[in-house]
Amino acid sequence: MARLTIKALLALALLAVGQAALAQDPAIPPVRYPALPRNAADASGFVPAGWAIIDSRRGDLNGDGAADLALLLKMRDRRNVLAIAAGDRTEHFDTNPHLLVIAFAEPRRGYRLATSSHGLFPRPIRPWTGDDPPDADTIGIERGKLTVNFNFLRGWSRYSFRWEKGAFRLIGYDSSGASGGCVESYSINYLTGRARLTRDPISSDRERVVWRRLRDVSPPSLDRMDLENFAPEMAIAGPPLAAPRQPMNEKTDPLGASMEEGDLRLEPLAEAHRADLKAACAEDPDIWPIYAISYDPDHFDASFDALLARPNGRAFAVLVGGRLVGMSCYLGIEEARGVLEIGNTYYIPDMRGTGLNRRVKDLMIGRAVDCGFRRIEFRVDSRNTRSQAAMAKLGAVREGVIRAERITWTGHVRDTVLFSILADEWR
């Protein structure tokens, strides 16, 4: 996951500059894929003019014991390299297409073309996605199988093919990637007609594994595959592994249901709030070093995903007059003990000092007490004098300092001031 995080940060930095400069996706120049010779003496004979080999592998692919060829070609046409304005500089966006070529070794006659495919490599339509372009690690030959590997901003995928009945048939698909605060993995075996699905929350060790059958065990062959219109996961029977949570309401989740008072509304934090909350958190970039977790633009998406995935938390978007102005959360929920914490609170600068925090806390404390919680905790960085003053105004009891209680995202070893309110004190 460290590699994904580094790539995500780099991609976000480029996106912030690049996407702001693009009003729409650039126009991709059309290309014509070449006809290939049926036979060639060596690998170079299958390389059309204006193309180059960027990866090649040798190994037996049709079971005759001879070393066959797998070639990944790329067009080299400067007209397909677009100049894209990115702030005060120009970036180059390479849209040149790729072509996979497979040739079988022929005794004393060089090689015979077996198949070719460009559908596995859709041309990019926008720059700065963070995905890796096909490279020297893309194709492989392993125990008679052809493999094609892709690396993306948040994960990877791998397709496995075997020569059967005059074509390269897809026999396996594996993938793994970060989504919604979890790492989701798929392993599809078209020979057995089964798939293994894994969902591993980033914030916990509660891995979930499910086995499913396939609806369709006849995927397209390599020469007919088009990844713009083919998704292996769609062949898996049953509901998605990461089924969306049902909307929270008073019956299904009384603690996490929406709360309202006048023009103030607290609603369960969801993917639909991502963009607005990200913009709100970016209004005060200097505040995040005082927080245990950063929601600044560089860290927001990873922190937001982890927050949604917390198994013992309930996060809320704070809206005033329909405008998202911050967030606050129930954390460390322990129903058996009747204890929870309220924290991870943030408001945009122009809502501070307006009494909003008291209104939010009144709703959240009242809801927790109504749901049977007997103790509500607040944990504040000892350096955060503003929040400590807010706790005093709220009537919370300062119980003491927990020394070196946690390490924050900046590496600071934090002393935490513990406050609490008991249900009997609130009623």
Image (cartoon, helix red, strand yellow):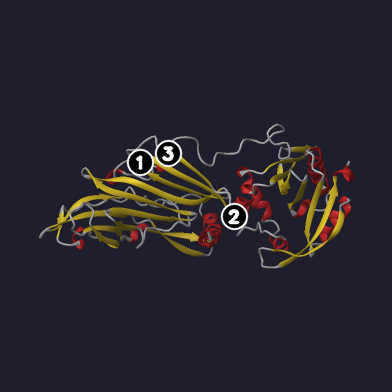
Pointer 2 residue: 302
Q: Is residue 329 left or right of residue 395?
A: left
Q: Which of marks 1 and 2 is nearer the N terminus?
A: 1
**Residue that appears at 59% across and 55% down:** 302
| Residue 105 picture location, percent across and down | 17, 57
Describe the element under mark 1 as helix, strand or loop.
loop
| Residue 55 picture location, percent across and down | 30, 62
Label drawn at residue 82:
none
Describe the element under mark 2 as helix, strand or loop.
helix
Pointer 3 residue: 234
Judged from this view, the residue extending furthest toward the front is 336
Q: Is residue 40 left or right of residue 303?
A: left
Nearer to us of marks 1 and 2 is 1
Q: Which of 331 and 16 is in front in this view?
A: 331
Residue 259 higher or lower than 33, as above or below = above
Q: Nearer the viewer, residue 372 or 292?
A: 372
| Residue 274 picture location, percent across and down | 62, 47
Q: Residues within 10 Å of mark 3 (few under 14, many from 20)?
A: few
What separation in Å lies between label 2 and label 3 (alpha carbons)?
27 Å
Q: Earlier in the sequence, mark 1 or mark 3?
A: 1
Q: Quadrant of residue 364?
A: top right
User: Is residue 50 something one can see in this rendering?
Assistant: no
Q: Earlier in the sequence, mark 2 or mark 3?
A: 3
Label drawn at residue 192:
1
Q: Quadrant of residue 285?
A: bottom right
| Residue 331 picture location, percent across and down | 72, 49
Q: Nearer the viewer, residue 373 or 148?
A: 373
Q: In this view, does 76 lie to the left or right of 311?
A: left
Amino acid, disc 3: Met
Give the quarter of the figure containing the C terminus. Answer: top right
